[in-house]
Image: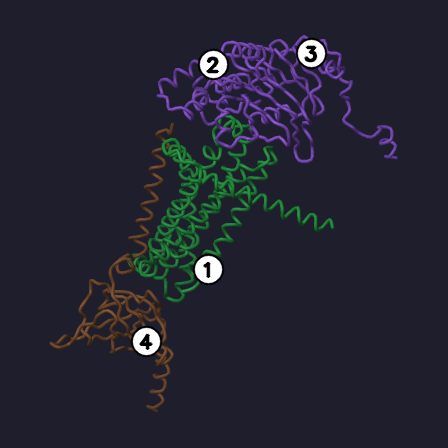
Chain colours: A purple, B green, C brown
Amino acid sequence: MEYLVEIENMSFSRGQRPIYEDINVRIPAGKTTAVMGPSGIGKTTLLKLIGGQLTPDSGDIRFKGHSIPKMRRNALFAARRDMSMLFQSGALFTDMTVFDNVAYPIREHTRLPEDIIRTMVLMKLQSVGLRGASELMPSELSGGMARRAALARSIALDPELIMYDEPFAGQDPISMGVLVKLIKELNDALNLTSIVVTHDVTEVLTIADYVYVMADKRIIGEGTTEEIQSSDSPLVQQFLKGNADGPVPFHFPARDFATVLGEGR
Amino acid sequence: MAFLASLGRKTLNIFSTVGRAFLILVGAIVARPQPLKNTSLVIKQIYIVGVQSLLIIGVSGLFIGMVMALQGYTVLVDYGAEESLGPMVALSLIRELGPVVTALLFAGRAGSALTAEIGLMKATEQLSSLEMMAIDPLRRVIAPRFWAGVISMPMLALIFSAVGILGGHLVGVDWLGVDSGSYWSIMQSSVDFEEDVLNGVIKSFVFAVVVTWIAVFRGYDLIPTSEGISAATTQTVVHSSLAVLGLDFVLTALMFGTN
Amino acid sequence: MTSRKVEVGVGFFVALAFASLLMMALKVADQGVSGTGETYNLYAKFDNIGGLKPRSPIKVGGVVIGRVGDIHLDKEDFTPVVTLVISEEYRDFPDTSSVSILTSGLLGEQFVGFHPGFSFDGIETLNEGDYIADTKSALVLEDLIGQFLFSQNKDD
């Protein structure tokens, strides 16, 4: 199988706090890969590392065979034109209409005449179902619509890789369904490679081809959807089933409760 | 030991902050120009930081000129020198009050807004998202705002002084009865275009660079949380005001200090 | 992308700033005889220059013809030397001309009064770098009062 993104023996830490220790991830081209894990373990960080916004402490990250951390600024910017990222908040520019937001990367990176840009933008908006909202400002959109508009913007220049940062977080069931459908359709129709970072297990398992489960700075499980669901790792099972207590403890690490209470006397 | 360590840590912090600030300044100034696209961005920002500050600058200039004429008149009239009201109002406005008060008002009105705006763009991941679109936020977000501030402030200071001198005329000549001819002519004989007006503009330009720089740097460098944004906006106003007042002394000493 | 409102606003702003600069140049700071025009220098030695300062005007019968440049002390005879920067427009003053330091009003600013002399044949004109021989020093109010009191006493 061909891999679009390869992460090898990568370690990363924020200040004194290690986030990743020696992880290996490979993202197959043309497939949807899900990266799952509990909140606060730096899944977004992983996407920023792939996008070159952060540099790993050691190890390598390769995009289309070229090492991202070793790239100079211009090469990195060139590589980023082939990737695109859907931020959790959507990150639409609040001072432009939806139309201008989607047109923005096209206007920035190409010298196309305005009528072609218009056609392109309307096509992208049509594909996410927001053509009617093209003249609205981002503040007038609901959360789900904002995310769809941002999705239209991230596919504006037909990238090869789309990274979704928590696309389902805080969505109602209908918007969630819409987004799941969109991710799947875009991936198939445009022959994209998708990385979906999420903790919404059920939704992502319906669209993912390959799954990585992360916890405690490491990859604790990987495989196809079926392999993951039948995994015998208790950690993976706890995560998939959503048990409150298990290998990932319910309590934040603390000293013995009885002892602490006793000290109050 | 602990004292030395904390002293060392603070020094290092200051150095790294100054270093990052310089990087941003360099990034904003050297940002590869894209004439057509950037001009329209700069014009839009001039509208926001410059045109929208016109009202407060105009009103403040008018009142400061009027108050100075009133105060000056009561002192000067005792010596029968009320004709000197013109140069007094004009020189203090052109040399000092114009550049300084404009810079202070600008820091409060436009500087804090710049910091908050850039900070919110950072908090809502708009800056990250620009980077991921292979667009340099320094060039697209910081540079236009920086240049708009640097261009706008000297113009605002000129307008401030001009309105102030007219305000002085209003009070001094129209209300208190100083002769209009001597208001202008004595002013003309004591104000020098190069020495006073141009130096005032240079002062204002220096303030503009410093205030806008502090504002965009604080916005770009802040911690993207509610506390971070509010702290950064406050810092923008405090730091730029202090910087303006301190620099004003240095510049005044250099420009007008020796004859 | 830039809307019409923005363009009009910025245009108005720039026009306003330009008008202010123009007002500074023409109405507030008189550009008449200073700096930019062609000038030539004359020198005059005074016993006492009073409160004369660089950039004080030089007037002929009330018309400003130039401004005082540098003021320094002659190293040999210890008298003040005043550089008179005169506009190129006003040339060919005879070298019988005299200068005096006058005060506008009782307490006003001091200026240099320039009195062109009569020109006969054979009288040369003042050129760049010449010294004006006939000078009258500033009136110092304290001296004047002293003289007045002194003469009063003599009358008694």
Q: Nearer the viewer, residue A95 or B59?
A: A95
Q: Earlier in the sequence, mark 3 or mark 2?
A: 2
Q: Nearer the viewer, mark 1 or mark 3?
A: 3
Q: Kindly identify the amino acid type of the residue bearing the numbered disc 4.
A: Ala
How far across and down, in percent of the image, does residue A261 sit?
85, 31
Which chain hosts label 1?
A: B
Residues tagged 2 and 4 counted as in contact (Cβ below 8 A):
no
Of the pair B82 and A66, the residue shown nearer to us: A66
Number of other residues with Cα within 10 Å of mark 3, as a class: few under 14, some 14 to 19, many 20 or more: many
The type of residue carrying mark 2 is Leu
Which mark's residue is nearer the viewer, 4 or 3? 3
Q: Which numbered tag is attached to residue A228?
A: 3
Q: Are marks 1 and 2 in contact (CB under 8 Å)?
A: no
Tell me which amino acid carries mark 1: Ala
The residue under label 2 is A130
Alpha-carbon neighbours of circle 2 within 10 Å: few (<14), some, or many (≥20)? some
Where on the picture, by quarter, is residue C51? bottom left
**Dot 4: chain letter:** C
- The chain carrying label 3 is A
